Image (cartoon, grey):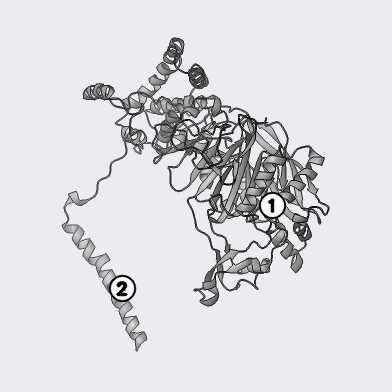
Amino acid sequence: MDERVTILARIAIHVLFWDVLCVQIPEQRKSMPASFSPSFSAATIKSVLERLFPDGTRGKRTTDESSQENAQAAHGASGLDHFPMFPSDLFAASAYLLERGDAYRRIAPDGSRRGTTNSVFSLPSDQKEKCQAIGQQWADIFHSFIQNNGASETIIKRWNAEVSKPVQVYWNTIVANADRPLLDTTSEEDPDVGFWRAVLALLIIADHACHNLGFNARRGWFDRFSRVVVLDDDVEDDGEAERSNGTGKAPVEAIKGDSKHFRYVAYTDTVCILVNPYVIRVLPKSRTPAVGCTMRTLSANLALLPPRGSVNMHWFHPVGEPEPDGKALNILAIPYPYEIAASDFRPDIQDQDAPRNGWGWFGVSQTWLPTDTSAVAHFALALVRKAERDCGAVHGIVFPEYALNWETYAELVRQIRVYAPHVEFIVAGSSSDCTGAKGNFVLTTTFAHAKDDERKALTYSRAKHHRWRLDKHQINEYGLASALDPHKLWWEDMLINTREVGLMAFREKSVFSALICEDLARSEPCHSAVRSVGPNLVFVLLMDGAQIASRWSARYATSLADDPGCAVLTLTSRGLITRVNQMGRRNPNSAVALWKDDVNSVSSLHLPKGAAALLLTLSAEEATEATLDGRKTPLAAAWRYHNHMPIMLAPGHASYQSILNSI
């Protein structure tokens, strides 16, 4: 009886929807006036620029200036009549127009070659060179302005003659077309290609004016308007933040218990000054892709990024004088923990007592961490000293996903800061961040000398973007069925915080970033932004199986190596590899790391029995790149892997003996 009632109810619902969708709505539309149909209008050049520059291209005016501006407005002038004063703002405007106007795809190095069509365009070589020269003069004049602490008569004359006048000529073309629809779909063969040539010229000028902006800000104009860290020698122990340049919130604050260790609390997520960051953002970039027809192949020094919201890219300028890229980079990869028990994967209590419909939450218990928070630091320091007997200096230390917690990491940073002066950075996976929040984080620390020449540490932390999902195949592969029901899907119990990616500038012209497991495997939301910025080096922290060419990590690493040309190092803890090897279902494999760059094939890096770490030696080669319009870019740093050596430790310090025993 109940089943028949249910069937009849479903039939009645279907009949009702059929009547509404196919009978009532069409009849109502017949009786509607024609004016009911919605009308849409295409965005104009002016409306787009007004969104980008809500206060105009030269910012808010004083009362007197506003009165004068109102008088000018009565005669047709607007706050968009003058080109933006800052090259990053000009880049944002020109790049945004090219992208939203769907014009960048028509750019080719040699311009139109067909004779009868304007569908392909570029600038003549001599005009491109002139635009690049204007950009260089813009940068030089800004530099002189900063050096002289103001504008002299000579600087003003140079500005008017060498920059302002020629740039304004191009900008006038945009102003003259202000009422034109941005996206003209009436004809593929746009007769007004001169407009887009002017926009491209402005992009080239702005792009070249910002050469080295991400790596040389302390000697340029941008530090006057950004939160560039300046380490002073008068920091108090009460956690008072280091001051930057009076832009409001200080970029860093001291961590309690260590006045020489700071955490970033404010970030550079755009180098624009007047452009609305909720419409578009711009950051420096490092690599220009060699393939594809995209906006990221059109520029050499700046990247166009989406507005604040879905993914926030944070650029950290170098503090102090960086080492040259040509110097070898020795990375100590520590695949800790070496053992992981099935019971370290624990189901949520609710999922034990009241199972959900086919899925549950799981957490990770870090039983491998010693109770003595200094043990891992002593262990890592011993590895550094052993490695430096071979290579002379260790420059970077990397731990995999979930290897540490904040307390252990903070002590590691303290000891490396004091006792390992050659180390430039540490990257580690952690179950907590510098605020005490729990989850799955990557912690990144760079080291710099203050004015008193005392070494200080600066740490940035951000959360993983996607939860790990364990299915039946993985549970059986890693031998976890005693802890997690293989007939269910298990999701990592963690919050999804605001998506962020940190970009750490290091050496003279390199930047590295770190991803956590699924951050590499899932394209959304960060991959497009990462490709736009083009970090030279990407560390991927994993809790995974063997790192071999046939597995997922190699596929996705290859994708980043192809576009935009990143060198990628994946590193997993040895714990799950050990479990797979012990079960004997597969041939034993000890590949804890994998390397892929834009030239060479995938290299699996094996950890021999008894070894505690791998010492990798990398170096940067100068790579010549070209933009979509045919400009040769400044030589980029392309990192190459040369070799690795296993690092073994003899029984030593009592505090880390338990770690040695697990190897």
Q: Residues within 10 Å of mark 2 (few under 14, many from 20)?
A: few
* Mark 1, residue position: 374
What residue is drawn where x is 54% and y is 34%? 229
Looking at this rendering, what residue extends furthest in the right direction? 650
Q: Position of residue 306 (x, y in %)?
A: 45, 42
Amino acid type, callout 1: Ser
Amino acid type, callout 2: His
* Mark 2, residue position: 14
**Occupied quadrant, residue 28:** bottom left
Q: Position of residue 434 (x, y in %)?
A: 56, 49
SS type, badge 1? loop
Residue closer to the observer: 651 or 503? 651
Residue closer to the observer: 119 or 581? 581
What residue is drawn where x is 56% and y is 72%? 488
SS type, badge 2? helix
Q: How many marks?
A: 2
Instruction: Report the Cα–Cα distance between label 1 and label 2.
Output: 67 Å
Give the side of residue 43 with respect to residue 329, left or right.
left
Q: Nearer the viewer, mark 1 or mark 2?
A: 1
* The N terminus, quarter of image: bottom left
Using the rendered image of the protein, determine whether residue 333 is visible from the camera's viewpoint.
yes
Give the side of residue 206 with respect to residue 411, left or right.
left
Give the side of residue 148 with respect to residue 407, left or right.
left
Residue closer to the observer: 401 or 490? 401
Q: Position of residue 501 (x, y in %)?
A: 54, 45
Q: Is residue 514 above or below residue 86?
A: below
Residue 399 has which mark?
Answer: none
Give the side of residue 43 with respect to residue 124, left or right.
left
